[in-house]
Image (cartoon, rainbow, N blue to C red):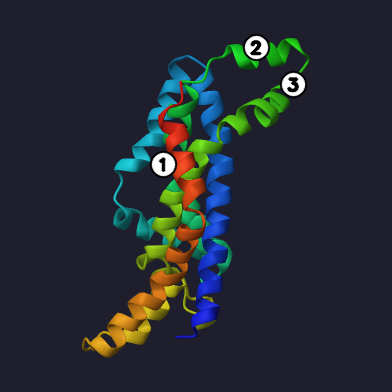
């Protein structure tokens, strides 16, 4: 299975996608949640419409786009594809959360001389930690368990994530329990260990987000 290489690939892709989605989605959601008007409402609706698009519908256009950009069979390509796929969820999470945050906090920071970037950096980002933990859990589960995107966009065995390595190890012609069950355990074990180690932070983030406001 080239196990450790596959686990390292999966961890790298998952962390990169989670960071990109958190940063881009939070920066997009902040003005959408604060600016009241027809344009911001329309942009928010367009972004959240991405939640209704099935993943398989977007496979062909994303594949053609990555091919034209020369990003097929590359870490950058698969990370970009996953980031785009999860951005609507991130914008929805952050915008919904920010709408419950009182604007008086930002107004006080502006009166103290903060620029818009400083307000976002020192006021908004710390408030987003609980919802970021919840979003990271959703993104991690999605990226770790997905088979379709890496199977389509990657062809180098050295770049395969754990799901593709398990799939190739089991084979497609028959089902051998002596391969299936150990491979399934090996594929989910790193994710299980990570959630056991970080369970307090995950539960704290979900709980803080639930009682906000």
Instruction: Please name whichever residue, 116 or 49, is drawn nearer the observer in this view of the structure.
Output: 116
Q: Quadrant of the N terminus?
A: bottom left
Question: Where residue 70 sits in the image (x, y, percent)?
Answer: 56, 66
Q: Measure the alpha-carbon separation of dots 2 and 1.
A: 28 Å
Task: Name the front one of labels 3 and 2.
Answer: 2
Q: Can I make out residue 196 in this image?
A: yes
Which label sits on residue 115? 3
Q: Can I make out residue 70 in this image?
A: no
Residue at which label 1 appears:
89
Question: Where residue 2 sits in the image (x, y, percent)?
Answer: 50, 85
Question: Where residue 66 sits in the image (x, y, percent)?
Answer: 50, 61
Residue located at (69% from left, 22% from top): 116
Task: Name the front one of labels 2 and 1.
Answer: 2
User: Closer to the N terminus: mark 3 or mark 1?
Assistant: 1
Q: Quadrant of residue 134?
A: top left
**Label 2 secondary element:** helix
Question: Where residue 203 sits in the image (x, y, percent)?
Answer: 44, 44
Q: Measure the alpha-carbon separation of dots 3 and 2.
A: 11 Å
Circles 2 and 1: CB distance less than 8 Å? no
Q: Is residue 31 above or below residue 148?
A: above
**Label 1 secondary element:** helix
Residue at which label 2 appears:
107
Q: Residues within 10 Å of mark 1 (few under 14, many from 20)?
A: many
| Count of picture labels | 3
């Amino acid at each position: 299975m080239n196990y450790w290489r596959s686990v390292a690939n999966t961890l790298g892709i998952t962390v990169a996608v989670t960071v990109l989605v958190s940063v881009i989605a939070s920066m997009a959601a902040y003005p959408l949640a604060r600016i009241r008007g027809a344009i911001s409402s329309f942009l928010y609706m367009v972004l959240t419409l991405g939640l209704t698009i099935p993943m398989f519908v977007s496979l062909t256009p994303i594949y053609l786009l990555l091919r034209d950009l020369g990003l097929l069979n590359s870490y950058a390509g698969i990370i970009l594809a996953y980031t785009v796929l999860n951005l609507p969820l991130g914008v929805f999470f952050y915008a919904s959360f920010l709408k419950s945050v009182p604007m008086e906090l930002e107004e006080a920071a502006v009166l103290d001389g903060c620029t818009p970037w400083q307000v976002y950096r020192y006021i908004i980002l710390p408030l987003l930690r609980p919802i970021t933990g919840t979003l990271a859990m959703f993104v991690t589960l999605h990226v770790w368990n997905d088979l379709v995107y890496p199977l389509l966009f990657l062809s180098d065995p050295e770049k395969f994530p754990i799901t593709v390595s398990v799939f190739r190890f089991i084979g497609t012609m028959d089902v051998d329990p002596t391969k299936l069950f150990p491979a399934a355990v090996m594929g989910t074990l790193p994710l299980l260990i990570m959630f056991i180690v970080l369970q307090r932070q995950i539960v704290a983030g979900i709980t803080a987000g639930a009682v906000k406001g």
